[in-house]
Amino acid sequence: MRNLAALLLALGIPATWACYSYQTVPLESVTEGAAVRARISQAQVEALRGATGNDGQLLQGSVLEASADALYLGIPVGSEEAGVLGRGVVNRIDLPFAEIEEIQVRRLSWLRTGLLVGVSTAVGAALVYDQFGSDTRGDNEGEDGGTEATLIPLFRIVF
């Protein structure tokens, strides 16, 4: 049971990332503060190469401001993969609508989150039952034939 719980825990940690999903939306519907992923044109990639530290067409950040013809994104400075992401430091990137090929907004997936919470609760309940549940195997029999009580110290007072 403990090996199963460890396996489910190891598999469950990456599942927490699955609570969010990205949905493609029209440019006009993006609001300030939204976490977004934008696919930009190759010409814009070349123009922003030094500012983003990213060679790809996909930018991930949050919308700082939205105007009638452009989005202003806050892109984290550094590289998450290398572990050198600056805490709270962002580059302000101006993206004209004409240079944005696709925009996706990050949304909470209630179904995935509910499944994750349900599985986590079931695993936790199984672990508690395994640890503290009734012991019917008979390996804790005392001298009088009864079962011994298991004492679990919850806290210790030191004098």
Image: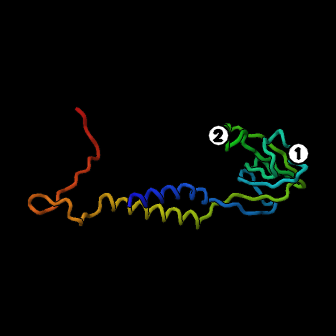
- Left or right, 87 with respect to 27, comes to left
Q: Which of the two labelled residues, at mark 2 and mark 1, occupies the earlier sequence position?
A: 1
Q: Horizontal and vertical percent for residue 110?
A: 59, 65
Q: In the rendered image, which quarter contains the C terminus? A: top left
Give the labeled residue for mark 2: 83
Classify residue 101 by image quadrant: bottom right
- Left or right, 149 with respect to 114, comes to left
Residue with the most extreme left position: 144
- Asked if residue 68 shows in the view, the reply is no
Q: What numbered label is drawn on residue 46? A: 1
In percent of the image, x 72 and y 42: which residue is there?
76
Classify residue 80 by image quadrant: top right
Q: What numbered label is drawn on residue 8? A: none
In percent of the image, x 88 and y 48: which residue is there?
44
Q: Horizontal and vertical percent for residue 35?
A: 71, 53
Name the residue nearer the viewer: 55 or 43.
55
Q: Residues within 10 Å of mark 1 (few under 14, many from 20)?
A: few
Q: CA distance from mark 2 to mark 1?
A: 25 Å
Name the residue nearer the viewer: 90 or 7.
7
In percent of the image, x 33 and y 61: which residue is there?
130
Q: In the rendered image, which quarter contains the N terminus? A: bottom left
In the rendered view, tell whether residue 69 sits above or below residue 138.
above
Q: Horizontal and vertical percent for residue 131?
A: 32, 58
Name the residue nearer the viewer: 63 or 128.
128
Q: Amino acid under label 1? A: Glu
